[in-house]
């Protein structure tokens, strides 16, 4: 542990400011609470929002897991994990059920989360209305008036142009029947996991200086139309080439030797766990 | 032992997070409150001071409602640099048990509820009561609660209805926290719907 830094990198004043914003975020599900977003030793837009939440929450007894698009070993995840463990000395893990804090970029783990865990999602663009309204004061007004016809219109235009809703990730959701919220760029496959989740979900956007939250057991509904219902990505008839799992989010890969399309679990720790449990095929 | 402002206050914060994310689930601050008590600021109840140390700094405003308002305000201001203001402007309103009956209702009425654009700039009322427990006198529903939770707050104040009136125009509203003499904390965010269980004779 690097003792030249404060515990969890921040001074106590910075932590308090993030903590107060987080408590307000929990009290108003889906509402984006502005916060100061301190300078971090990684660039804004590289997970600083999630990192600041993690640092304000973490204590000596926590076990931390960091994932980046399902992988525990990608550069972003490894660097964030190192920064946190170097300045706190906490244990890190790759096993989802051993972790008490899970910071994630763009995925919710396959293993169902429990009430003893907090999921922290990194968010690049927290404002779901930003695509059609560039002004922050205008979007604040739209949220205040619960004026979300633009969000539906955006999906309607996609249906008109392409025949279906084409949000690959970050499909907007309605939280607690009040706020339309960007669930961070998780695939549509993960949206239903936010609904009535057992774990507290916190979302942090460092560059945009916003934190927001989905408390446990909160209604989260993906926006859709009666005749065009929300559909998560489907991996029917497909299984992971390594562990054979079905019903999980799969990456599509091309086997360069044979030119065949193959599928593999996106959540690497889930895949490893399955392999360890059954033995390699 | 002395209060460790890094680790002990982190643990208090996490308990508040859990209690606020799961209204009805009480947070036990006994251990941390003991450290504060040992440092001796006798006018201010230890658990109230502990919450102030966890959340307050020069960026926030507060109001103490108590017979010993002057002393407690001074203590909190000196320890946290938070600014004392009038109730209607305060980010945090601390109501102690020796406050006169009606003080809580009055504070709920005039506390700032935020604006539709900025519902987060609203007050949090922290109330000292003789006991909070999970006895079924109040039924809680809302985000953070799977089906129904029960809670009991031992106080002479009739606050449930005035809180409901204050929070009627969601997302405007106030947060409330009740702390008892055993340092048990009940957190009630504005989303929690409360109905009183009445005994029918």
Image (cartoon, coloured by chain):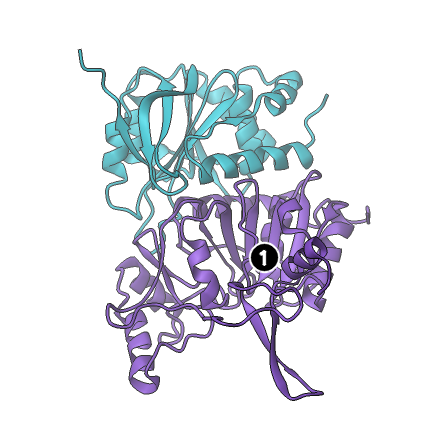
Task: Tell me the subunit letter for badge 1.
Answer: A
Task: Say which element carries label 1.
Answer: helix
For this rendering, which residue is in front, B102 or A227?
A: A227
Residue designated by label 1: A50
Q: Quadrant of the N terminus of chain B?
A: top right
Q: Decide if residue A39 is in sight here.
A: no
Residue depicted at x 55% and y 41%: B58
Colour of chain A, in one word, is purple
Q: Is residue B76 left or right of residue A143?
A: right
**Residue B2 falls in image quadrant:** top right
Chain assigned cyan: B
Tell which residue pokes out farthest to the left in this image. B201
* Image vertical order of residue B99 relative to residue B13, above or below: above
Image position, residue A74 (x, y; %): 70, 67
Left or right: B179 in relation to A80: left
- Image coordinates for residue A268, horizontal then vertical, percent: 66, 63
Q: Is residue B94 left or right of residue B57?
A: left
> Measured from the top left, where is residue B181 in percent x and y?
49, 15
């Amino acid at each position: 542990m690097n003792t030249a830094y404060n515990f969890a990198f921040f001074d106590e004043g910075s932590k308090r400011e993030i903590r107060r914003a987080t408590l307000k975020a929990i009290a108003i599900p889906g509402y984006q609470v502005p916060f100061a977003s301190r300078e971090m030793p990684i660039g804004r837009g590289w997970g600083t929002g999630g990192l600041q939440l993690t640092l304000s929450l973490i204590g000596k007894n926590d076990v931390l897991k960091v994932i980046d698009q399902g992988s525990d070993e990608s550069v972003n995840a490894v660097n964030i994990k190192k920064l946190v463990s170097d300045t706190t000395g906490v244990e890190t893990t790759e096993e989802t059920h051993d972790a008490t804090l899970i910071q994630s970029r763009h995925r919710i783990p396959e293993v169902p989360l429990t009430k003893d865990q907090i999921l922290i999602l990194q968010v690049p663009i927290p404002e779901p209305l930003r695509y059609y309204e560039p002004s922050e004061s205008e979007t604040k007004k739209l949220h205040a008036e619960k004026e979300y016809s633009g969000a539906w219109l955006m999906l309607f235009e996609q249906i008109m142009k392409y025949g279906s809703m084409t949000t690959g990730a970050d499909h907007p959701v309605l939280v607690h029947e009040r706020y339309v919220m960007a669930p961070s760029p998780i695939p549509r496959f993960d949206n239903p996991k936010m609904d009535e989740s057992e774990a507290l979900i916190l979302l942090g956007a460092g560059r945009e200086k916003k934190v927001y939250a989905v408390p446990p057991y909160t209604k989260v509904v993906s926006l859709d139309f009666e005749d065009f219902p929300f559909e998560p990505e489907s991996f029917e008839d497909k299984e992971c080439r390594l562990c054979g799992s079905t019903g999980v989010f799969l990456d599509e890969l091309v086997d360069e030797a044979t030119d065949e399309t193959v599928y593999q679990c996106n959540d690497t720790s889930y895949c490893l766990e399955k392999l360890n449990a059954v033995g390699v095929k | 032992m002395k209060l460790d402002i890094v680790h002990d206050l982190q643990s208090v914060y996490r308990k508040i997070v859990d209690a606020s994310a799961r209204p009805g689930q009480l947070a036990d601050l006994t251990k941390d409150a003991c450290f504060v008590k040992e440092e001796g600021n006798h006018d201010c109840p230890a658990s109230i001071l502990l919450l102030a140390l966890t959340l307050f700094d020069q960026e926030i405003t507060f109001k103490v409602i108590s017979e010993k308002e002057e002393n407690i305000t001074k203590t909190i201001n000196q320890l946290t640099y938070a600014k004392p203001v009038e109730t209607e402007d305060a980010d945090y309103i601390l109501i102690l048990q020796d406050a006169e009956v009606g003080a809580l209702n009055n504070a709920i009425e005039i506390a700032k509820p935020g604006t539709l654009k900025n519902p987060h700039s609203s007050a949090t009322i922290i109330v000292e009561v003789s006991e909070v427990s999970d006895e079924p006198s109040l039924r809680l529903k809302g985000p953070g609660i799977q089906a129904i939770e029960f809670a009991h707050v031992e106080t002479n104040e009739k606050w449930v209805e005035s809180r409901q009136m204050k929070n009627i125009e969601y997302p405007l509203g106030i947060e409330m926290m009740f702390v008892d003499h055993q340092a048990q904390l009940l957190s009630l965010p504005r989303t929690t719907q409360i109905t009183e269980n009445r005994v029918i004779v």
